Image (cartoon, grey):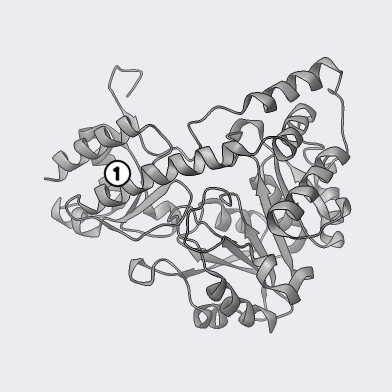
Amino acid sequence: MRAAGRDVLSLSAGEPDFDTPEHVCAAAVQAMESGDTRYTAADGTPALKQAICNKFERDNGLGFEPGQISVGAGAKQVLYNVCAAVLNPGDEAIVLAPYWVSYPDIVKLCDGEPVVVSAGLEAGYKVTPEQIEEAITERTRLIFFNTPNNPTGVSYTRAELEALGQVLAAHEQVLAVSDDIYEHIYWGDEPWLTPAQVWTGMQDRIVTINGVSKAFAMTGWRIGYAAAHVHLVNAMRKLCSQSTSNPCSISQAAAAAALEGDQSILVTMRDAFRERYEYMYEAVNTLPGMRCAPAQGAFYVFADAREAIRAKGLENDTQMAELILSEAEVALVPGAAFGAEGHLRFSFACGMDDLKEAISRIGGLLA
């Protein structure tokens, strides 16, 4: 549509609109100029692994050794490696909906069976311990957590994590996979916590996954990482060595600089995204037929659009997204992609002027 000259506003992208910090780019240039362009260890350089350990100690109070760290070409590859290392045909993995689109498909690619546990708007998009207990079977091997969540922006509190942890503690065959990629884009009332900080008796059964894509505006650099039990990390390293080999050596040098250098961009981006969220939360809730729950992080507003869909005589959220794209020239993502039919995801990872114009266009269409 843009190629045809139409002025499409995209509220669909899941990446910050900030530039990668200058000192990070400078580290990449230095790596190239110093000849840091050869193979590295399959799952990360010693320098980057140490920087990741330092990050966990500094930000989360968690102690890891470099042998417990696995680096991949983005958090997505690391998530895939976890599933490929753990799942056998017929094993089950619990996926909490609304979920990031790749979780169930990664499970399927690894011959596992995703078991979706859903929570709607009325529940604040948070599942209960009772739902988790009911979903666990003798075949359950994994459960995914993502907080702050994509697509809802919702984050679990310490008390909520403690309650969920009590359930998981009784099922020793279940590995908890925590996707913390939005850790630093958080503005909740209480301090943000990763499950490994709360489930202290389950350390050997927790995989903590993070990366530099969202926090440091480095989506294209493709560096993610995991901290886990050394046996799982060894298995993931074997997978890396027979699939991608190492992540890009230059990107690894840049990621180490991001984790070890000036952290002020984390505050700058968080404050900008919070300002945009406060506008979008109020604005989307005033759109005819749309409602959304409060969020505590990430850069999304997730709207229950079922009333608007009915009012337009449409069948589902995909048709609504297509209507908004074709008539209002605003791109959104249908909720069905996240396991939540009847919803739409609004990304506010773009400038405030574009956000206001997009809301104006959608409001005119729905009115």
Residue 33 in percent (x, y) is at: 82, 15
Which amino acid type is marked by label 1?
A: Ala
The N terminus is located in which quarter? top left
Q: Is residue 52 above or below residue 65?
A: above
Density class for disc 1 (Cα within 10 Å; few <14, some 14-19, many ≥20) is many
178 or 311, nearer to the observer:
178
Q: Residue at x 67, y 81 (%)?
A: 138
Q: Is residue 177 above or below residue 349?
A: below
Q: Please tell me whether residue 97 is drawn above or below residue 202 in the rendered image.
A: above
Q: Is residue 362 above or below residue 233?
A: above
At x 34% / y 34%, what residue is drawn? 352
10 relative position to 89: left or right: left
- The residue carrying mark 1 is 321
Among the 4 quarters of the image, the one containing residue 263 = top right
Instruction: Tally the marks.
Output: 1
Residue 184, percent across and down? Answer: 57, 48
Q: Secondary structure at mark 1?
A: helix
In this orientation, which residue lies closer to the viewer: 327 or 259?
259
Query: In the figure, is residue 82 to the left or right of 108?
Result: right
Instruction: Quarter of the image for the C terminus: give it.
Output: top left
- The residue lying toward the viewer, choosing from 84 and 43, is 43
Q: Quadrant of residue 191?
A: bottom right
Q: Residue at x 19, y 55 (%)?
A: 289
Q: Quadrant of residue 126?
A: bottom left
Measured as percent of width and height from the top left, residue 254 is found at 73, 30
The answer to whether residue 24 shows anywhere in this view is: yes
Residue 91 seen: no
